[in-house]
Image (cartoon, grey):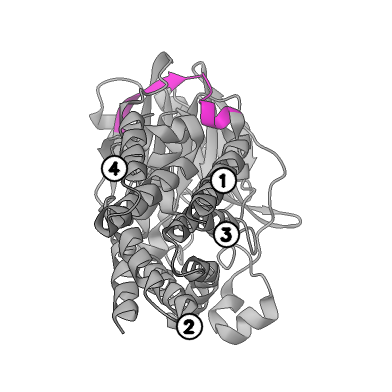
């Protein structure tokens, strides 16, 4: 019973590391509690599953805001299955070395659930809770998985300290963590740019945020005109969020004309999130109109949101949730595109693509600024938007780039390459951000090595466990 209770508490502690609480240090605490629970029980797989259920439910409960509880429960169950191998930690009960197995197991778990099934769902990847951790800059050297590795290792150290075991290992973990804290940012600025990001809001929150055609668009036009009348200098670009243009501007010519008119009168290019009606189906796109009012570049979203922009296993999904019938499958893009303006090479990243490693890596290559366009209207009253903000902060560190994230309903933010929020809007109201961002062309070490750093970290963590086990034997 004690182990069951501690598994509940450790799951709660782990969820507290994420928004809305953002208590980064509760991740190591949760690992220490979980290790105590799983090493004191005769039902380790049950304890591991309860730990995962509690963690996933409280971090992902927002997914059921408008689609109901059943889809959320199914998502939580699926995500929690990946944590079952944590029960292996209880194997060979007399050995202290078994606790080190939690490190490679959790790292592999994070990687697997971020990629499988249906492209994965790594929204609550452990590293995404560490945006405020003092050692966060290590992500620019070894990738976001290194953040998870340090936090988990601190949890192991905490457990060993109170168990009065392997105190030399505890000291080494603390030393490595201190070194990580002292790492400098990989800054190499090459100028700056002024970005005007427009948060136009929506007429109503929820799945039907764009029920009335062009209303979301007109709200962004209005907020853009307000912003242009209030700022004291010309921006280098105007950025609108995903779905800001809620009708196809090439079918609705009046919409295209209004966007072109703003671009020409302000002498500023506009990058807008647009829904296109292509011959083969709908496309979620990021389009840049030049300051001459002409379409310059078009990027079509490549990593679509499962169950949001397309329905996997449609027959089964529609049986589980009738709302699945309302989802029209979008068509994916096939290549990375950069928006170039004023000497800037910007990588457009549309919402869900922020958690897709492969898409992120190809999008950022060759660019010097990250632009995230997202629409949080469906989950506007939940912690989803703040969680996404923290994901953006980690991605900015990992890629050594400034990142501008703009949402229809908020939060929108400007984030520097150290993961610090320079400015942020309030949620569920119209507003804008007008900030100077630094342009950085140099690739981070983490970006240069890509997935290789994750493989090395996992192999290194496994070798540490094997070494500890042989010492125990």
Circles 4 and 2: CB distance less than 8 Å?
no
Q: Using the image, tell me which numbered label, if any, was put on residue 327.
A: none
Q: Report the mark closest to the observer, 3 or 1.
A: 1
Residues 323 and 320: in front is 320
Residue 226 seen from this side: no
Please tell me whether residue 40 belongs to the stretch shown in magenta: no
Residue 211 seen from this side: yes
Residues 257 and 56: in front is 56
Q: Residues within 10 Å of mark 2 (few under 14, many from 20)?
A: few
Q: Secondary structure at mark 2?
A: helix
Q: Secondary structure at mark 1?
A: helix
Tell me the residue that label 2 is attached to.
Answer: 70
Q: Quadrant of the N terminus?
A: bottom left
Tell me the residue that label 4 is attached to.
Answer: 132
- At a point 58% along the width and 45% down the height, the residue shown is 357
Q: Report the mark closest to the observer, 3 or 2.
A: 2
């Amino acid at each position: 019973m004690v182990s069951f209770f501690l598994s509940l508490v450790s799951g709660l502690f782990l969820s507290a590391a994420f928004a809305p609480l953002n208590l980064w240090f509760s991740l190591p605490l949760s690992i220490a509690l979980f290790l105590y629970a799983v090493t004191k029980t005769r039902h380790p797989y049950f304890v591991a599953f309860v730990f995962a259920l509690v963690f996933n439910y409280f971090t992902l409960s927002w997914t059921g805001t408008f689609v109901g509880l059943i889809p959320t429960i199914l998502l939580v169950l699926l995500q929690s299955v990946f944590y079952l191998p944590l029960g292996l930690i209880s194997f060979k009960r007399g050995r202290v070395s078994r606790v080190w197995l939690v490190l490679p197991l959790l790292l592999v778990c994070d990687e697997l659930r971020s990629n499988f099934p249906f492209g994965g769902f790594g929204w609550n990847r452990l590293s995404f809770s560490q945006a405020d951790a003092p050692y966060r800059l290590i992500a620019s050297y070894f990738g976001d998985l290194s953040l998870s590795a340090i936090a988990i290792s601190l949890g192991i150290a905490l457990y060993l300290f109170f168990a009065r075991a392997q105190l030399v290992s505890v000291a080494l973990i603390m030393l490595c963590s201190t070194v990580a804290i002292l790492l400098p940012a990989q800054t190499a600025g090459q100028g700056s740019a002024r970005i005007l990001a427009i948060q136009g809001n929506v007429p109503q929150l929820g799945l039907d945020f764009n029920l009335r055609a062009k209303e979301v668009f007109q709200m962004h036009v209005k907020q853009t005109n307000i912003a242009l009348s209030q700022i004291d200098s010309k921006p280098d670009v105007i950025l609108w969020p995903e779905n800001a243009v809620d009708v196809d501007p090439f079918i609705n010519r009046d919409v295209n004309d209004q966007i072109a008119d703003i671009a020409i009168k302000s002498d500023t290019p506009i990058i807008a999130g647009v829904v296109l009606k292509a011959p083969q189906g709908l496309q979620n796109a990021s389009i840049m109109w030049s300051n001459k009012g002409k379409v310059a570049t078009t990027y079509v979203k490549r990593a679509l949101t499962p169950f949001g922009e397309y329905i996997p296993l449609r027959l089964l999904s529609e049986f589980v949730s009738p709302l699945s019938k309302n989802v029209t499958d979008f068509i994916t893009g096939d290549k990375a595109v950069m928006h170039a303006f004023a000497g800037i090479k910007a990588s457009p990243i549309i919402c869900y693509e922020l958690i897709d490693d492969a898409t992120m890596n190809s999008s950022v290559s060759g660019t010097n600024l990250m632009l995230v366009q997202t629409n949080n209207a469906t989950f506007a009253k939940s912690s989803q938007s703040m969680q996404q903000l923290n994901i953006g902060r980690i991605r900015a560190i990992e890629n050594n780039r400034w990142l501008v994230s703009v949402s229809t309903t908020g939060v929108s933010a400007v984030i520097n390459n150290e993961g610090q929020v320079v400015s942020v809007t309030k949620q569920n109201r119209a507003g804008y951000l007008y900030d100077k961002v630094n342009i950085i062309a140099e690739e981070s070490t983490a970006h240069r090595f890509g997935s290789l750093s994750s493989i090395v970290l996992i192999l290194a963590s496994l070798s540490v466990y094997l070494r500890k086990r042989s010492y125990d034997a």
